[in-house]
Image: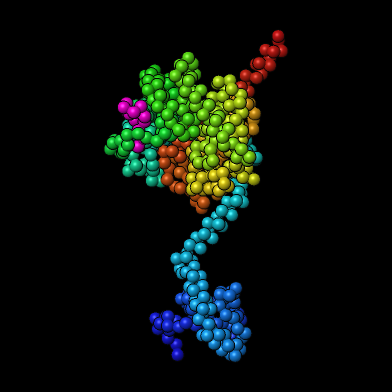
């Protein structure tokens, strides 16, 4: 008779041996076989497809079709041999644990993850936009709307819900340092609106308030109601603040902001000597370089620059070997800042070995993050990259793209090799669709940048870090293009002058 499922489970639970004598070899699935095997029963079966696969390699007993004598013989043997019967049951129960729904769901998830990785490994070239191989690069027009939308009188807000500021996460020193750097680039590009001037003032005021006078360190996170959430921020936030302040002290056209930035820079500089992360050293060196461009005799900055560059060279000597030309055993985020600082500082200090080490590290980093189709694939934050060979391809972050654009432009200035300029432009196209998914990260309607490239989509939030990263990269490329255009315009006059002498 047919029984309902609860009664059927009672029968299976009471059994020691389950017999499944289907006559059709093409029986592709048997629910009862799955139930019995998963419940840890010794199974005797004819070799139909489902049973032949599940019971292979001694996981059960297979007998010929329509052979009752064989079934009787094998069942009798199992009844006489309790040890063998128990071994089959134990093995069936163990393997059956992998057949339960939670494990099946995990297997599907693993399969989908592998499929996405295989798709990413193809590294197909985006078909959304014309690329450098087809046409001369055309940069997006400057659009300040979202940067201003993400700021208020306190400074830059950290996060967004889609294109709307997310007030619940407040502010941070990291983003206000980035925004201050951006206002200086925009000013150099000719942007003079009162709103941008106010943004520069707010960001500098935020950094001034962030510096803890008792520790000489910057606090990083501030709630929306203007309460500091820590007494000492991350090392990275200290380095980024020094970078922004050193640049503001040298480049700002506003005397008051220059003087305040210089004072804050000098107040915060001593603490940098005790910081231990190479990326923080790089940020600090970028700030020192800018500061020394107008204060070339400041011994404190000169001495710290020598100390930090020596540390970077030591790290490179310790870790760069075989096919791993890096300053640590892993590469995480904002990686290109390290070779950028080495190249820039090496030029300023007239140390060719420092420049060459930086160029070698940058070449390696570019190769690591470029596909066979010449698509930039920034190291993903979902695991980063390690010497042992593991490397995350997602979630790709705009900050890594911007750092690489900036470092390539510095390499171009150091070498005059057009490869680096071409590479900077190519990397920048990650924002405009030349990436693993062929999706736009930059939103031309809002002026914002989406927060990340996941394995199957973009992160639709347009936070401060990603938006500032896009605009910093765009502004640096625009300035580089302007410099090249001015150089080309000056060439005929130079040639004419030479011809008349």
**Frontmost residue, 259 versus 254:** 259
**Frontmost residue, 58 versus 36:** 58
Instruction: Tell me where residue 179 appears, x and y as whole percent.
Output: 42, 32
Question: Relative to 498, is 230 on the left or the right?
Answer: left
Q: Residue furthest top?
A: 501
Taking the magenta stretch, the answer to whether it contains residue 214 is yes
Residue 44 shows in this picture: yes
Q: Name the residue rendered at 46%, 76% in the picture.
A: 39
What's the colour scheme? rainbow
Q: Is residue 462 above or below residue 271?
A: below
Instruction: Tell me where residue 294 appears, x and y as whole percent.
Output: 47, 17
Q: Indicate the quadrant containing the N terminus: top left, top right, bottom left or bottom right.
A: bottom left
**Frontmost residue, 65 versus 261:** 65
Q: Is residue 38 above or below residue 172?
A: below
Q: Is residue 461 above or below residue 221?
A: below
Q: Name the residue rendered at 44%, 23% in the picture.
A: 246
Q: Indicate the quadrant containing the C terminus: top left, top right, bottom left or bottom right.
A: top right
Taking the magenta stretch, the answer to whether it contains residue 465 is no
Q: Which span of residues is magenta-colored?
A: 209-221
Instruction: Tell me where residue 61 appears, x and y as whole percent.
Output: 57, 80
Residue 486 shows in this picture: no
Q: Name the residue rendered at 51%, 53% in the picture.
A: 456
Please tell me in which quadrant of the rendered image residue 216 appears: top left
Instruction: Tell me where residue 247 appears, x and y as whole percent.
Output: 45, 24
Please tell me in which quadrant of the rendered image residue 182 appears: top left
Q: Name the residue rendered at 58%, 32% in the picture.
A: 317
Q: How many marks?
A: 0
Question: Relative to 228, is 389 on the left or the right?
Answer: right
């Amino acid at each position: 008779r047919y029984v309902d499922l609860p009664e059927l489970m009672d029968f299976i639970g009471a059994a020691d041996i389950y017999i499944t004598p289907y006559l059709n070899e093409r029986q592709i699935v048997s629910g009862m076989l799955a139930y019995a095997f998963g419940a840890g029963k010794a199974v005797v079966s004819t070799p139909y497809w489902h049973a032949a696969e599940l019971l292979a390699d001694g996981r059960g007993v297979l007998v010929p079709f329509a052979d009752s004598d064989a079934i009787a013989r094998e069942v009798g043997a199992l009844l006489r041999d309790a040890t063998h019967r128990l071994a089959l049951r134990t093995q069936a129960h163990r393997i059956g644990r992998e057949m339960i729904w939670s494990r099946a769901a995990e297997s599907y998830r693993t399969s989908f993850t592998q499929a996405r990785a295989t798709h990413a490994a193809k590294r197909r070239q985006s078909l959304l936009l014309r690329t450098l191989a087809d046409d001369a690069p055309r940069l997006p027009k400057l659009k300040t709307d979202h940067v201003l939308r993400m700021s208020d009188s306190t400074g830059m807000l950290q996060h967004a819900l889609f294109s709307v500021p997310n007030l619940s996460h407040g502010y941070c020193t990291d983003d206000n340092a980035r925004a201050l750097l951006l206002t200086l680039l925009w000013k150099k590009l000719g942007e003079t609106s009162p709103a941008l001037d106010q943004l520069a003032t707010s960001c500098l005021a935020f950094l001034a308030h962030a510096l803890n006078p008792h520790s000489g360190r910057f606090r990083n996170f501030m709630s929306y109601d203007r309460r500091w959430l820590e007494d000492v921020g991350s090392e990275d936030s200290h380095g980024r603040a020094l970078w922004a302040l050193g640049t503001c002290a040298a480049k700002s056209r506003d005397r008051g902001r220059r003087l305040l930035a210089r004072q804050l820079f000098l107040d915060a500089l001593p603490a940098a000597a005790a910081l231990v992360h190479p990326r923080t050293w790089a940020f600090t060196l970028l700030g020192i370089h800018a500061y020394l461009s107008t204060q070339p005799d400041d011994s404190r900055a000169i001495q710290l620059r020598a100390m930090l560059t020596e540390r970077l060279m030591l790290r490179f000597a310790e870790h760069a070997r075989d096919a791993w030309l890096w300053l640590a055993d892993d590469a995480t985020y904002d990686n290109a800042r390290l070779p950028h600082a080495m190249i820039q500082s090496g030029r300023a200090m007239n140390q060719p070995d420092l420049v060459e080490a930086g160029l070698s590290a940058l070449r390696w980093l570019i190769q690591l993050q470029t596909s066979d189709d010449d698509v930039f694939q920034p190291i993903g934050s979902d695991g980063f990259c390690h010497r042992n060979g593991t490397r995350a391809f997602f979630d790709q972050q705009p900050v890594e793209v911007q750092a690489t654009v900036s470092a390539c432009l510095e390499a171009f200035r150091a070498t005059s090799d057009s490869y680096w300029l071409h590479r900077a432009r190519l990397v920048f196209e990650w924002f405009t669709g030349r990436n693993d998914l062929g999706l736009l990260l930059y939103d031309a309607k809002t002026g914002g940048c989406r927060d990340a490239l996941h394995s199957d989509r973009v992160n639709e939030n347009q936070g401060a870090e990603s938006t500032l990263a896009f605009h910093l990269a765009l502004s640096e490329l625009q300035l580089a293009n302007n410099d090249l255009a001015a150089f080309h315009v000056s060439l005929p006059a130079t040639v004419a002058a030479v011809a008349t002498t």
